[in-house]
Amino acid sequence: MAVTIMLRLSVPEWTLMACGILLPALGAQAGQDGADDSVRAMLAMMEGTYRSHPTVATDAELPDLVDRRVVVQAPTFGDYVMYWQLNSGPDSEVYRQRLLVFEATDDGEIVQTTWSFRTPERFVDAFDAPGLFAELAADALEATLPEGCDQVWRRTNTGWEGSVSPETCRVWSERRQMWRRIGADARLEADAYWQAERGFDDDGRQVFGTPPGELYRLDRISD
């Protein structure tokens, strides 16, 4: 009889123990899945080709830019990676090439880390050459900006907004031979991408870039 009682008590006891172990794990997995879904949704919206329209009065200082972004597989650097190439001017010359790595945080934000190629010429127009990125080794890239300069993205009602804070982003200007604080803003929606970059001295005075709140617009021209 005593044995029977022990058996009857042991079943719910072990059931509760299992729930205590599994339910938090399941909750953590659900949270991670939701974060991954968020990154995938943003990259799906971001992927494509954009072009500026410098004839617009507010874009008088912006050259003719073609901005193309494509999701690639570069497992050495992360699960969510994008190749970005910016072409500029009437001859559409390559102006900038970067590998963008995205990672979701626990509070719903997405952090974008930007990497530069040590041999950028290998990757010009590499939108349809996935093998180049899949085989990338860690030493093929270098950090574009120091710690504190990552762009942080947050969801909005119509898309996403990204920012770099001049409070945390401080870089050395070789040209000016002085420190500069860098702030950046970006806005992503289904039909356009807005961006702006601003520089400040250590006293907080703006030394280049658009006025606060003013961003350049690049219209989506293809998916």
Image: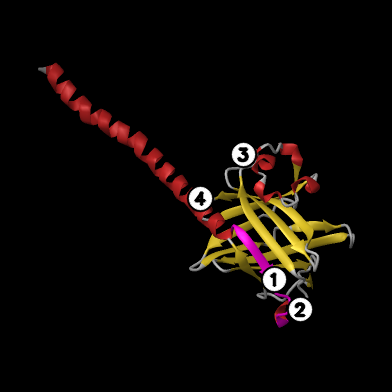
* Mark 2 to mark 3 CA distance (whole Å): 40 Å
Q: Which residues are magenta?
A: 47-57
- Residue on which disc 3 sits: 75
When asked about the image quadrant of residue 162, the answer is bottom right
Closer to the camera in the image, 219 or 13: 219
Circles 2, 3 touching at the beta carbon (< 8 Å): no
The tag earlier along the polypeptide, 4 or 3, is: 3
- Give the class, few, some or many, for how many residues have Cα within 10 Å of label 3's Cα (few <14, many ≥20): some
Front disc: 1 or 4 = 1
Instruction: Tell me which residue sits at (83%, 60%) in the image.
Output: 179
Front disc: 4 or 2 = 2
Instruction: Give the amino acid at mark 1.
Output: Ser
* Numbered disc 3: secondary structure: loop
Instruction: Give the amino acid at mark 3.
Output: Pro
The tag earlier along the polypeptide, 4 or 2, is: 2
Closer to the camera in the image, 193 or 153: 193
Q: Is residue 162 left or right of residue 182?
A: left
* Mark 1 to mark 4 CA distance (whole Å): 34 Å
Above or below 115: residue 199: below
Closer to the camera in the image, 193 or 148: 193
- Residue on which disc 1 sits: 52
* Numbered disc 1: secondary structure: strand
Above or below 201: residue 43: above
Q: Looking at the rendered structure, which numbered label has been put on residue 60?
A: 2
The tag earlier along the polypeptide, 1 or 2, is: 1
* Mark 1 to mark 2 CA distance (whole Å): 11 Å
Instruction: Tell me which residue sits at (90%, 59%) in the image.
Output: 177
- Residue on which disc 4 sits: 106
Instruction: Give the amino acid at mark 4.
Output: Asp
Q: Is residue 45 left or right of residue 124?
A: left
* Mark 4 to mark 3 CA distance (whole Å): 22 Å
